[in-house]
Amino acid sequence: MPTTNLNNNLKPLRHSCEHVLMQAMQKLYPKIKMAMGPATDDGFYYDFDLDEKISEIDFPKIESQMQKIIDTDLAIIKSEISVQEARKLFKDNIYKLEWLKEIEERDEKVSVYKTGDDFIDICAGPHIESTKKIGAFKLTKIAGAYWRGNEKNKMLTRIYGTAFPSKNELAEYLKSLEEAEKRDHRKIGTEQELFMIDDAIGQGLILWMPNGAILKQQMENFVLNEYQKRGYKLVITPHIASYKLFEQSGHLSFYKDGMYSPMNIEGEDYYIKPMNCPFHVKIYKYSPKSYRDLPLRYTELGTVYRYERSGTLQGLSRVRGFTQDDAHIICTPEQLTDELVGVIELTKFILNTFGFNRFKVYLSVRDPQNKTKYLGDDKEWNQAEAGLKKALEISGWDYATDEGEAVFYGPKIDVKAYDAIGREWQISTLQLDFNLAEKFDMTYTDNNGARKRPFMLHRALLGSTERFISLLIEHYAGAFPLWLSPIQIVIISVGEQHKEYCKKLASEFTEKNIRVEVLDENETVGNKIRKAVMQKIPYVLVIGNKEINSDNFHIRKRDNEEIIEINKQEFFEKIKKLIDEKSLEL
Ligand SMILES: [Zn+2]
Ligand SMILES: [Zn+2]
């Protein structure tokens, strides 16, 4: 999911509102057992245990109780007490007692916050001074959540809400939520029959329906073709591999939690792949390499499978199986900057083509105070970080440096893009890797015949194509650019006698690789047009006597009710040109 801009000043306010929520709940439902809840980037939530069933219908009642607490302007006061004292306060609450046990093990005092006289909660804070400072709030939804996120624990109830200093800010936020809801890719994905998820197949595993499969194919063909034009070599590797590969790559020691259990084939454990990298390394290692072979750029639309908790899965944005537009670049230290500049230019070109023009770029480097926690030597790191910086400067991309944010095996560049409603999405990653080159002993001979270690760079520009499609759906609210639209033109016959001509016309478009659908069911023309508009089809052609007997079409463009008359030949050419140019306009 995209993140909204986090305003740190809001956190104490939202956290305090969360306490007010629990205070109100305690008043309304005396048997409630509070569990825990934080302030989040969008608001707050609280988990609790209650036998009584609560639903969104109860929100007005809870909200008005909360408002009373806010209007009374109760002071919120921190104090520190001993674990013994706290145990007495929360003696009937198994959740709080579990916290307290952990606090006791750490040998700490218990920090508690009191709101007025009748509410107290274990909490590290910080909070605002009094309840009146909560200018405006709203409860937003209710859901189930396992205690501490673990599906082995009891399912609790979670109420979500948000709070702001003023009513205006809240109204603005609620409006943006509404806008986001209209664009929700799960909703549009169902309406346009793009993808589905089926319990018998499993959560987080996507079935691409015909319309969605076209969208995915268009996207993937475009990027793969572009990569190949720029000197990348296509490779294709299997979905599973023996434990031997993942043992050598280190995945079985540092990435095992993200991998699925192995299957045993003839006495040997095989794993479904969480990453494509070690497969590409094996292709590199097929024969000895010299500096003349480098740079080598291997690319693959590789489908990988990673374990995600069922509670975190979400439509296309968080799944268990996904395709990466993956590539690995292997080069000499001297080639590093040029290769990076190439990747950055390519990233810009690809994202621009999909209609994204506003970015935020982050360079993640080592923590200079703590160099020992990283793999690779000082010289390699300095070279790599300098290479990344220089490449960003040459490309003229504004960026922020995050010290200490590099992963242990190398520095990286992350690219975030803003969508049509201003949300930020993490998309492309360029990651240098000192680990795999080392683990697989990747080498090349330099021009003096010496064996050297190459640089290895992972890059995925769309990230996962599943997640990228969720972004496209929400960015365009389902009204895709012509070249990506699963159906580009709908042809509507006015009457029975025009059906034959419509079919002939459809095959003419199809021959030219233009995707059309003929709507000839016995419905009114108005209904058929409405259907096409609902599906956000770029063009609608209505065919009656007038069109059959003339050189002109009457067309209706998406988002424009006006009917335009255009010469048939001209229309064919125009459509073809817009598709070829991947135009964002109709
Ligand atoms: Zn708290
Ligand atoms: Zn990789």
Image: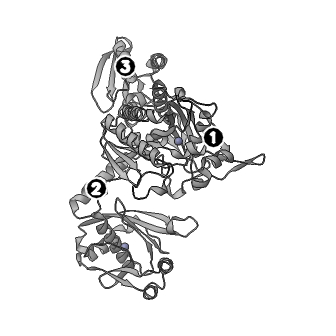
- Residue at left 62%, top 35%? 285
Q: CA distance from mark 3 to mark 2?
A: 41 Å
Nearer to the camera, 510 or 409: 409
Please indicate whether residue 150 sits to the left or right of residue 109 in the image. right
* Label 1: how many Cα within 10 Å (few below 14, some 14–19, many 20+): some
Q: CA distance from mark 1 to mark 2?
A: 43 Å
The secondary element bearing badge 3 is classed as: helix
- Residue at left 29%, top 56%? 174
Q: Where residue 115 sits in the image (x, y, percent)?
A: 31, 80
Q: Where residue 98 sits in the image (x, y, percent)?
A: 51, 77
Does any portion of residue 384 appear in the rendered image? yes
The C terminus is located in which quarter?
top left
Q: Quadrant of residue 12?
A: bottom left
Please indicate whether residue 212 sits to the left or right of residue 553 in the image. right
The secondary element bearing badge 2 is classed as: helix
- Residue at left 63%, top 30%? 287
Dot 2 beta carbon under 8 Å from ligand 1? no
* Label 3: how many Cα within 10 Å (few below 14, some 14–19, many 20+): few
Q: Quadrant of residue 59?
A: bottom left
* Label 2: how many Cα within 10 Å (few below 14, some 14–19, many 20+): some
**Answer yes or no: do the residues labelled 3 and 1 have beta carbons within 8 Å?**
no
Residue designated by label 1:
239
Nearer to the camera, 290 or 202: 290
Residue designated by label 3:
577
**Dot in front, 3 or 1:** 1
Residue designated by label 2:
173
